[in-house]
Image (cartoon, grey):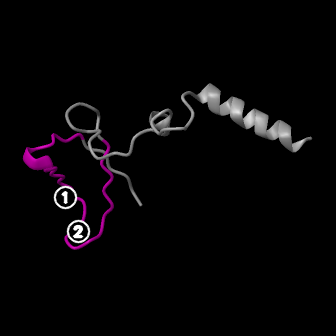
Amino acid sequence: MEGLRQQVTVGADGLIVIRVPELEEGSRAEVIVMGQGGGKSDKGLPPNLSSFIGSCPNMFRSPEEADEFLRRERDSWDS
């Protein structure tokens, strides 16, 4: 499988056009789209796991608090 890299401009309604005259009509190709930021590029993507810290009631308010809880739990296993 050969790779091909092209810079494109996203058009109206997110339309992206890629022309590859080297490929035969009817052949199959895989397309991977990677945005370069700006606009609505983050819309629809799942949030980072760290954004969930402190977001639920009765949960940990910081990574340090979660670490301390886990440390106490591990220590209790040794008893």
Up/down of 75 relative to 12, above or below: above
Q: Is the residue marked by circle 2 packed among few (<14), some (14-19), or many (20+) residues within 10 Å? A: few
| Residue at image location 63% in from the left, 28% down from the top | 65
Q: Where on the picture, by quarter, is residue 47? A: top left
**Depth order, front residue of 12/72:** 72
Coordinates of residue 41 in the picture (x, y in percent)? 26, 39
Residue at mark 1:
21
| Residue at image location 24% in from the left, 59% down from the top | 22
Residue at mark 2:
24
Drawn side of residue 73 relative to residue 17, left or right: right
Q: Please state which amino acid type lies under the numbered disc 2.
A: Glu
**Depth order, front residue of 79/50:** 79
Drawn side of residue 3 relative to residue 52, left or right: left
The quadrant in which the N terminus is found is: bottom left
- Name the residue furthest left: 12
**Depth order, front residue of 31/27:** 31
- Name the residue furthest right: 79
The quadrant in which the C terminus is found is: top right
Q: Is residue 45 magenta?
A: no
Coordinates of residue 36 in the picture (x, y in percent)? 29, 34
Q: Please state which amino acid type lies under the numbered disc 1.
A: Pro
Up/down of 1 relative to 70, above or below: below
Magenta stretch: give its range.
7-34
| Residue at image location 77% in from the left, 34% down from the top | 72
Magenta segment's dominant SS is: loop
Coordinates of residue 31 in the picture (x, y in percent)? 30, 56
| Residue at image location 64% in from the left, 33% down from the top | 66
Coordinates of residue 69 in the picture (x, y in percent)? 70, 34
Q: Is residue 30 magenta?
A: yes
